[in-house]
Image (spheres, helix red, strand yellow):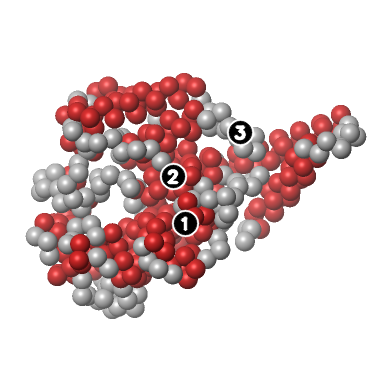
């Protein structure tokens, strides 16, 4: 990873990097690879049985930590200390075994292979040719360029999960197009991107995103996550009605669907949620860590995969700089690496320099 990114930084000219990722117009232009991303480069704004042994070890560790913090406990023998060290070693071995299954960057991969089935997370019956994909994307891109996205697709019932012409269709071309169109509609209605401000309708964007998420459409799942990150401020009542009391599990599931369907911007969002301990309204309340929490590890994986997919993503570069510079240990795990901290500090500086050269304000770090 480090070698790959070093080569990218050294071998790519300033002009190429600026043109590749410092794109700020929402529509792109035909012939540009970003044209088909529809403005993707917009600046960032219950235990499974397989965990029974791990849970038991985690509870032992909690007890050990509690005793270590109890000044009245003066009878801690060398034999007990040795046993506790063996318990911690066993826990770390369990962690390493589970984490070895993570290949695609989704948190659900931490389930052992006999439980995780990729097919169960993917959008079904939408395999079409590259030529068909390009034709559909050109059609959608042309409607965005002309400012007619909602005129052309906005009244076709994409918010209805039982719609026979969209989500319930069986034709692969129709299904692929449904996911692609719904992705742009959920984004447009929810956040006002690609449309006129007066056309914004967050509740409709939410309904479309939920219909797509239920089908495992990666793009709509991503925008559903973004809508839920905003919560009541964007769609009144959504926190209580949709998100409920376990936001961490819900966000993880939603962004996993996006990741496992190839919608790579989800790497950034999920890694950021791990780093920040969820949206502000949930921090230190419903986003707590435990001795068997894998958040620090998954954060590293997802930031890294984000930067592999988009080498000039400033948010993910900053994320790697932060975690490799952090000497904190949580449950005997740390991402600290002095060499990589220096590398990503320089990497971030180069990206910020490109923004300055391009006349683009440098976004503030969260």
* Quadrant in which the C terminus appears: top left
User: Which of these two is toward me, 83 or 173?
Assistant: 83
Q: Which residue is mark 1?
A: 251
70 relative position to 134: left or right: right
Q: Residue at x 23, y 69 (%)?
A: 174
Point out residue 86 in the picture as x, y percentages from the top left corner.
76, 35
**Mark seen at residue 329:** 3
Q: Earlier in the sequence, mark 1 or mark 2?
A: 1
* Quadrant in which the N terminus appears: top left
Q: Quadrant of residue 217?
A: bottom left
Q: Residue at x 24, y 32 (%)?
A: 355
SS for callout 1: helix
**Mark seen at residue 298:** none
Judge whether 7 appears above or below 205 on screen: above
Judge whether 158 appears above or below 23 on screen: below
36 relative position to 238: left or right: left
Between the residue at mark 1 and the residue at mark 3, the CA separation in whole angstroms equals: 24 Å
Q: Which residue is mark 2?
A: 272
Q: Residue at x 51, y 47 (%)?
A: 277
Callout 2 crowding tier (Cα within 10 Å): few <14, some 14–19, many ≥20: many
Between the residue at mark 3 and the residue at mark 2, the CA separation in whole angstroms equals: 18 Å
Point out residue 334 in the picture as x, y percentages from the top left corner.
57, 33
């Amino acid at each position: 990873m480090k070698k790959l990114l070093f080569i990218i930084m050294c071998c790519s000219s300033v002009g190429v990097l600026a043109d590749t990722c410092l794109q700020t117009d929402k529509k792109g232009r035909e012939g540009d690879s970003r044209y088909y991303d529809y403005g993707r480069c917009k600046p960032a704004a219950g235990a499974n049985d397989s965990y029974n042994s791990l849970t038991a070890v985690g509870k032992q560790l909690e007890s050990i930590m509690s005793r270590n913090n109890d000044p009245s406990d003066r009878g801690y023998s060398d034999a007990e200390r040795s046993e506790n060290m063996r318990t911690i070693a066993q826990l770390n071995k369990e962690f390493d075994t589970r984490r070895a299954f993570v290949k695609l960057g989704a948190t659900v991969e931490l389930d052992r292979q006999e439980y995780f089935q990729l097919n169960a997370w993917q959008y079904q019956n939408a395999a079409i040719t590259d030529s068909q994909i390009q034709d559909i994307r050109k059609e959608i891109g042309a409607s965005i360029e002309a400012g007619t996205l909602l005129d052309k697709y906005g009244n076709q019932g994409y918010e209805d999960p039982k719609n026979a012409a969209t989500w319930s269709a069986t034709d692969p071309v129709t299904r692929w197009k449904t996911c692609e169109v719904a992705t742009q509609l959920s984004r447009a209605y929810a956040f006002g991107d690609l449309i006129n401000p007066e056309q914004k309708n967050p509740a409709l964007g939410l309904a479309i995103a939920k219909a797509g998420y239920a089908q495992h459409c990666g793009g709509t799942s991503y925008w559903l996550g973004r809508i839920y990150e905003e919560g009541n401020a964007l769609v009144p009542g959504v926190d209580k009605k949709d998100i409920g009391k376990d936001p961490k599990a819900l966000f993880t599931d939603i962004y996993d669907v996006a990741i496992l369907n190839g919608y790579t911007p989800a790497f950034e969002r999920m890694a950021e949620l791990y780093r920040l301990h969820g949206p502000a309204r949930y921090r230190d309340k419903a986003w707590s860590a435990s001795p068997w929490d894998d958040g620090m590890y998954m954060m590293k994986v997802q930031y890294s995969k984000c930067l592999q997919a988009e080498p000039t993503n400033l948010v993910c570069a900053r994320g790697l700089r932060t975690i490799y510079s952090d000497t904190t240990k949580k449950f005997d795990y740390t991402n600290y690496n002095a060499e990589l901290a220096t590398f990503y500090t320089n990497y971030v500086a180069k990206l910020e320099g490109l923004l300055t050269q391009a006349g683009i304000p440098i976004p503030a770090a969260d």
